[in-house]
Amino acid sequence: MFLRNQKGSILAFLTISMTVIVSFAAGVMDIGLMYENRRQLQNGVDGAALAGAMELALGNGQAKAVNTALDYAQRNGITVSNIDAGYPEVANEGPYTDNAVVVAATRHLSLLVAGIFNNGAGDVRAQATAVIAPLLPTEGVWPWGVPQSDIVPGQLIPLKVGAPPPVAGNFRPLDLPPLGGGSNAYQDGIEYGYGHGLDDYISATLPWDVYTETGNKVGATKEGVDYLVGLAASSGQDDPSSSWNEPDDVCTWPGAPKNPSDPDVPPPASWVGNASVCYRVGIIPILQSYDVHGMSMVTVVGWGAFYLIGYSPGPGGLTYVWGYFNDMAIISGGRTNWGAPLSGLIGVRLWR
């Protein structure tokens, strides 16, 4: 009798243990399924919100913004019945209207354990809000300064000049803090964008006084620009039909010149580059003026997005760097400059 009772206890224990183990394994599978679908859903609504907000930024209206957001979401596996796109003002954040697109989505899943109390079904939800707003960059700044009087949309602009310079000893490179980095720091700023270093500092307010970097920096300029242009070509970003040129990752346009000697095909008026991923798109300080001599202080009064064409050697190999100015770009990081007018560097970014 004792042995029989013991066998019965063992069988009951094994049954309960197997039930717990199977339930635990099913629960882990549920969690993994929910996590993966939540990730996919969040990526989809992020991209949809950004795509819709870009239409607002380009002045294409609310209906176009909503339709673009819906289309982008559908192409990422989110059905129309599971999405809600809107365009409210982001309350109390700035003197703007129709400056945001909100995309929310729900996906229904068939779950093993978590859905026992809901007929086997579970939901994952994701929401994203993308805004257009004036931005202050925190990284990705090229170490050149362009006077505001030179900013002409649709025309090639010298980002750096060659000899003879307009002002003695200055060719438009900037010595951004910490001072005294020389050619190495200057080249690093071209290739990787100033702001990524631990000691780099970009003011959160404007105006901001910085120093010029004297000397022509021919070698560092050439190597830095060659590096960016080479990456753009090898990655496929110079091809307008490549996968880079999705609504939120536009890196070039049809006929865009790849060096200063190409036929001059300016960007369309509505062209928006992504400085977060595009090697030819970067942020440059816009200066009040550049009427200085030697190492001098200049005043940054704004920020501009520029598309880099390349450099052209002048007499004696003295290098000019050329690019196009853009009113707007997508940038990573950055501080939203609420309250400033929607001009200068306008960004499309995820707000929450």
Image (cartoon, helix red, strand yellow):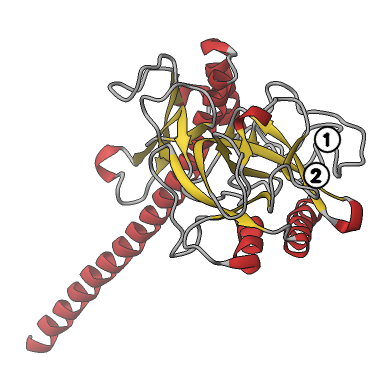
Cβ–Cβ under 8 Å for marks 2 and 1:
yes
Which residue in the protein does label 2 denote?
A: 238
Q: Residue at x 59, y 43 (%)?
A: 283
Relative vertical location of residue 90 with respect to residue 33 in this rendering, above or below: above
Q: Residue at x 46, y 45 (%)?
A: 209
The percent coordinates of residue 261 (x first, y second) are: 92, 41
Q: Please indicate, yes or no, whether residue 250 appears anywhere in the rendered image.
A: yes
- Tell me if 5 is positioned left or right of 249 in this view: left
The amino acid at mark 1 is Ala
- Quarter location, residue 181: bottom right
Q: Please indicate, yes or no, whether residue 243 appears anywhere in the rendered image.
A: no
The amino acid at mark 2 is Asp
Foreground label between 2 and 1: 1
Which residue in the protein does label 1 denote?
A: 256
Characterize the local packing of mark 1: few (<14), some (14-19) or many (20 or more) Cα atoms within 10 angstroms.
Answer: some
Relative vertical location of residue 338 with respect to residue 307 in this rendering, above or below: above
Q: Which structural element holds mark 2?
A: loop
Q: Which structural element holds mark 1?
A: loop
Number of numbered markers: 2
Q: Nearer the viewer, residue 163 or 345?
A: 163
The percent coordinates of residue 293 (x first, y second) are: 62, 48
